[in-house]
Amino acid sequence: MAQVTLDAVRKVYPNGVEALEASSFTVPDGELVVLVGPSGCGKSTLLRMVAGLEEITEGDLSIGDRVVNDVDPADRNIAMVFQNYALYPHMTVARNMGYGLKNRGIPKAEIEEKVREAAAMLNLSEFLDRRPSQLSGGQRQRVAMGRAIVRQPDLFLFDEPLSNLDAKLRNQMRIEIRALQRRLGTTAMYVTHDQVEAMTMADRIIVLNQGRIEQIGTPNEIYEHPASTFVASFMGAPPMNLLEAEAGQGRVTLADGEVVPGAAVNGHAGKITLGLRPEDVAPAPEGDLDFNVDIIEELGAQRLLHGQVGGQAFSVAVPKDQAAETGPMRLAVKPGAVHLFDAGHGRRL
């Protein structure tokens, strides 16, 4: 196990494209950190630099107490799990899991023992003599994880490992990966574009956008106190409502003149962006805001009401047993639920 430290690590490709701005953070020993963001934000590039598969343009990368910028990937004592499993189709499960150890010259008896232990941990014992084509997607992913486990690495790297699985398997596997990482206590970095995976799996989340780190924090910190409008809209399902508003005279006013209660402007004046999560407002006859419902979306556990507040798109989440219909209604804002951001650069006020 080992701590991972990035000190002003930057990646610029030969064509001049900056894939990652200078970034600094630490992943403590035993922590699972999730790198999340949209396609092209730099998260996989960052992970590949940690793996040694991408050269670092500037800065220092350390695993444990060793700077590894120029260390070969095979000598970093890491294990990587990919989204496409990367299994050898002609080999059995047992041979796939033990192949890396065989290449390192580990005795056959020791390899077999490590493979049996990992297989038992992953519920693969009965499949050791099968080939990948005889397995389900979830079982293949377990084999890929078993291949990583037998190496007993200092660091696990996961590059969107669940993206090829269906929704039910994805939910099951993320629980299994999290439980396994906690059991082993191995430091892990996990890349995904799925904010639900990030929120449910991470000790800490690193949100990336266009090659820069937008925010680092626990899932609760990221959700409750987003550092920017990008984080606010990306983290959360359904996403946060973001409304154009005006701050002045100690209050916040929407375009239609409605005053939003509970918005602490702290002396700020001028155009701002106001954020409200769909679950932080609720229908109430004597509510604070006018809301016109255009569409009702049934999600089973809850309903999403889509419409407009102050002439701008707005969504409200209500329990499944709460009656709802299209048309006008009033909304009450929960205390402490209002988020305010600068209208220009989008940073939290």
Image: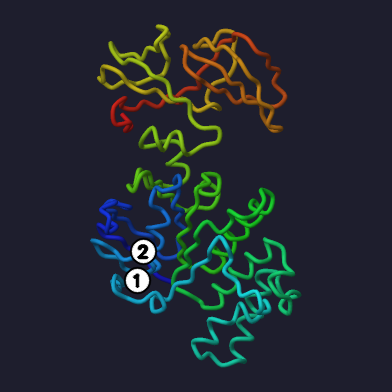
Q: Which residue is mark 1?
A: 64
Q: Position of residue 20 (x, y in %)?
A: 31, 52
Quarter where residue 177 is shown: bottom right
Left or right: where does residue 310 sit relative to residue 146?
Answer: left
Marks 2 and 1 close (CB-CB < 8 Å): no
Instruction: Give the number of the disc on residue 249.
Output: none
Badge 2, how many Cα within 10 Å: few under 14, some, many 20+?
A: many
Residue drawn at 55 percent across, 87 percent down:
102
Mark linked to residue 49 = 2
**Amino acid, disc 2:** Met
What is the secondary structure assignment of the residue under circle 1? loop
Q: Amino acid at mark 1?
A: Gly
At which x and y percent is residue 131?
A: 70, 75
Q: Is residue 134 above or below residue 227?
A: below
Residue mark closest to the camera, 2 vs 1:
2
Q: Position of residue 233 (x, y in %)?
A: 45, 33
Q: Residue 349 versus residue 19: which sits nearer the camera?
A: 19
Q: Secondary structure at mark 2?
A: helix
Which badge, 2 or 1, is on the more N-terminal residue? 2
Q: Up-down: is 3 above or below 284?
A: below
The N terminus, quarter of image: bottom left
Q: Please give the name of the residue rendered at 50% of the width and 28% of the height, measured from the top-left corner.
A: 277
Cα separation, mark 2 vs mark 1, equals 16 Å
